[in-house]
Amino acid sequence: CVVCHTIFGFCALASHDAASDTFSFAHEPAKKAESQEISDEKGLKVMEQMMEQVGWLGPLLIAAAKALAVLVVGWMAAGAVSGMLRRKLRSIPEMDATLANFSASMVKWVILLIVLVAVLGIFGVEATSLVAMLGAATLAIGLALQGTLSDLAAGFMLILFRPYKIDQYVDIGGTAGTVVDLNLFVTELATVDNVQIIIPNGQAWGSIITNY
């Protein structure tokens, strides 16, 4: 009887252990699935936080891409229109080549100015605001671009009084050469050795000019 009681107890213990193992095995996939869901939720929250932190970059990158496209197209258009106008004007027999080049250069810079305003508009800067900002910063811009504005004004004076023209051999402040181009800001000379010399219009206008 003692042996029978011992065998019965051993069998009961084995049955209990087997049942426990079966229960644990049955619930193990559910625990794994629950753990996976928690992990996925944490990943989504981290991604949402990252998107919120860098969300402002999206519109900025789009605006930058648009601005770059406008700049490229505008630069190409300005060059094409300027070149076409230069050829058209120089094909007129009565048109002076110097005036034709100067006019084409002026048109090019006007187009580029319009392109600049368009680019600023892409970034949210309105034209009226831009004019107000430029008006308020006129003094600072004038001081910073004093030399450039002087060259611009001198360019108009050179076109108005025409002390030299394209293809003429001149001496400007001790620098001699054939006038190749005269635009808004500079005068380009070519020496007899085919050396290119760029003279700012402000310097040319303020120098002694000898036209041979």
Image: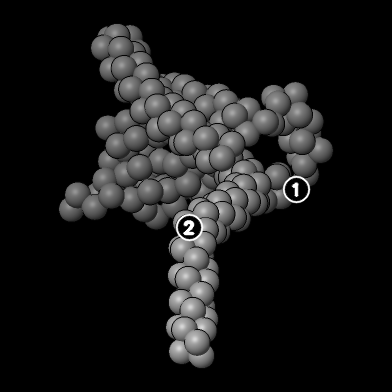
Residue 166 is at least partly visible in this image: yes
In the rendered image of this protein, does residue 98 appear above or below residue 134? above
Quadrant for residue 46, please give it.
bottom right
Q: Which mark is residue 33?
A: none
123 vs 143, nearest the viewer: 123
The residue under the point 69% across, 31% down is 125
Q: x, y percentage for residue 136? A: 81, 38
Q: Quadrant of residue 210?
A: top left
Residue 195 at x, y percent in the picture: 24, 52
Callout 2 amino acid: Ala
Q: CA distance from mark 1 to mark 2?
A: 80 Å
Q: Nearer the viewer, mark 1 or mark 2?
A: 2
Depth check: 9 or 72 in front? 9
> Can you tell which quarter of the image residue 85 is in?
top left
> Mark 2 — residue?
26
Q: Residue furthest right?
A: 136
Q: Are marks 1 and 2 in contact (CB under 8 Å)?
A: no
Reading the image, the residue beneath label 1 is 140
Q: Residue at 30% of width from left, 37% of height from top? A: 180
Relative to 17, is 103 above or below?
above
Q: Position of residue 173 (x, y in %)?
A: 44, 52
Nearer-the-camera pick, 70 or 40: 40
Left or right of 152, for residue 173: left
